[in-house]
Image (cartoon, rainbow, N blue to C red):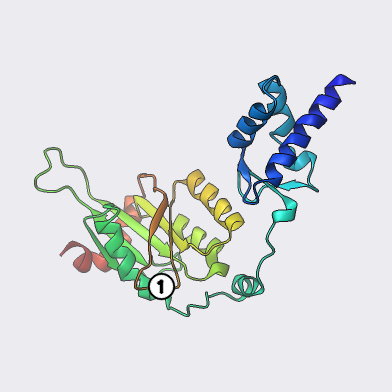
Amino acid sequence: MKRPKIHERIRSIAIELLDEQPQGLRYSELLRRIKQTEPELNPNTVNNCIWNLEVLQPQDVYKPVKGLFRLVKFKEPTPPELTRELQVGPLQSKLREDVFYPLFASWLKNDLEEVTHAIALGGNVFRDRWGTPDVIGKSESKRSDVIKGPTSIVSAEIKVDLAGLVTGFGQACAYKLFSHKSYLVIPSQTPDEEMARIDSLCQMVGIGLVTFNAKNSTLPEFRLIVRATKHEPDLFYTNRYVTHVEKELFS
């Protein structure tokens, strides 16, 4: 009968600690604080008691994102205006998506330094149902480089519509067919749970993830979350699509 009491005590301490932190605590921090509170506790026992705390006590604890424990009583309801945005689309900024294309093209080249040249596209430039990237760029070796590498293509899909995040992810995946790297660019206003899912998906398939302030084209504040993983596309499709923008991209 001693073990259940120890487990109950540890979980009780965890709840008390979380009650002091409305924003929640990461697993490692929660573990550290429990050990500070009860130094004599076995670390393995503590781990076994709290690693799935949200499953054992769902009425008290939940995870807004991976690795973060928070008390249910601190869970913030989705504001009505955000619910409407998720249902019907664009953020209240009413800024057109294509406003951000050249801004991201510049950021991709000058801040992230992923490309040596980038252009805004969008629309149906590639005349293909697989879609046209909103931004496409190339990365080439500089004349000053001692060792020169092959040219690579980088594509990006930008979304200001919170209801189109899944569609945007699918489009970014499709661009890997002809691009060496692909990026998905989404509003920083994306809810935490949605952001966590997209973050995980992008890491799984090697797509880069960038957030930005979709309400301010003057200061979009692009921020790299996940850097794209380079892979070898199908050069048949690379040549097929890049032909449409050869003059703009390689002049």
Instruction: Indicate the position of residue 14 as horizontal and vertical percent values.
Output: 72, 37
Query: Relative to 60, is 121 above or below?
Result: below
Foreground pick, 119 / 6: 6
* Residue drawn where x is 67% and y is 46% of the image: 20
Foreground pick, 71 / 159: 71
The three-letter amino acid code for the residue at tag 1 is Asn
140 relative position to 201: left or right: left
40 relative position to 174: left or right: right
The residue to which callout 1 is attached is 216
* Residue drawn where x is 21% and y is 55% of the image: 116
Query: Relative to 76, is 215 above or below?
Result: below
Tag 1 secondary structure: loop
Instruction: Indicate the position of residue 121 as horizontal and vertical percent values.
Output: 33, 70
Q: Residues within 10 Å of mark 1 (few under 14, many from 20)?
A: few
189 relative position to 134: left or right: right
User: Given the current orientation, which residue lies at the most extreme left position?
Assistant: 144
Give residue 89's quadrant in the image. bottom right
Q: Quadrant of the N terminus?
A: top right
Foreground pick, 182 / 97: 97
